[in-house]
Image (cartoon, helix red, strand yellow):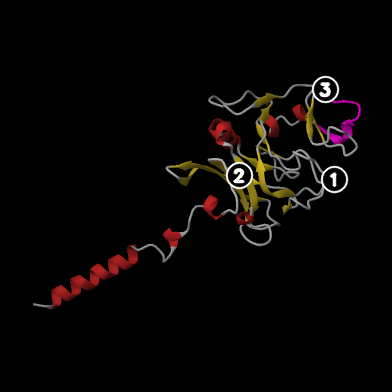
Amino acid sequence: MRRPLVTAAVLLALAGSLGAAPAGASDVPPLPDRLADTGGGSQLITAEAPDTGSTTGTVTWWERRGGRWAEAGSAPARFGANGLAEGATREQGTSTTPTGLYELPYAFGIEDAPAGTTYPYRKVNEDSWWCQDNESVAYNRWVEPRPSHCRAAEAEHLISYGTQYARALVIGFNYEQPVLGRGAGIFLHVNGRGATAGCVSVPADAMAEILAWADPEREPHIAVGTASGPTAITRY
């Protein structure tokens, strides 16, 4: 009479062990909680690549809900053709995406802002350029029209990038106090054909979703980095 009871107990124990989550899996905090800094706002975008040689990874947007970070959306991402590099020492023209934690000054695009967008949004026209000329006082700035001190060969004619700059967010890398030769024109924008020249890119629908989600009053930032190593995203 005791054998069926013993068998049932064993089966229950086995079922419990099979259904249990791996030890510690539920204890891993969300990525924003593992960052050294999130910028102080209640919205955050993370752009994470497996390593510095990667040209692909993941962009995730997060927000504070009830005192905790929660994922609001995620999309596959593309990075620079030569991977990622430490933002503090990156060099212009290397086709690397700078790692670090950055503000998002404003958005722009050739197309209209998505419905629901509250972020400052600047519309691109035929006279819109981004100056990357190290000899110009407008280095790493939108110029409209392009001044004579910013050579056309050293600037991006924004309207020429109809796919990538359909919609974009300016990443505040080397923006507040630009260092010549460090790099200019780093954006979060719509995917082109492949890896970028140093920006972060996502599919068009994800870019539209991010712009409709971003709230300037919640002070969103972007953290760019790798899963581990000296450029680990958790360092920023």
Asked whether, in this view, residue 11 is left or right of residue 57, the answer is left
User: Residue 30 or 156: which is nearer the viewer?
Assistant: 30
Q: Secondary structure at mark 1?
A: loop
User: Residue 147 or 78: which is nearer the viewer?
Assistant: 147
Residue 179 x %, y %: 82, 44
Residue 153 x %, y %: 88, 34
Q: Which residue is mark 2?
A: 39
Q: Which mark is residue 112?
A: none
Q: What's the residue at 23%, 73% (across, down)?
A: 10
Q: Residue furthest left?
A: 1
First in sequence: mark 3 or mark 2? Answer: 2
First in sequence: mark 1 or mark 3? Answer: 3
Q: Which residue is mark 1?
A: 181
Judge the density around disc 2: few (<14), some (14-19), many (≥20) Cα neighbours within 10 Å: some
Above or below, 130 against 228 in this view is above
How far apart, in angstroms, are the residues tagged by discs 1 and 3? 23 Å
Q: Nearest to the eye among marks 1 and 2: give it.
A: 2
Residue 154 shown in magenta: yes
The answer to whether the residues at label 3 and label 2 have Cβ atoms under 8 Å apart is no
Above or below, 176 against 118 in this view is below
Q: What's the residue at 55%, 35% (across, down)?
A: 218
Q: Which residue is mark 3?
A: 145
Q: Amino acid at mark 2?
A: Gly
Above or below, 218 against 38 in this view is above
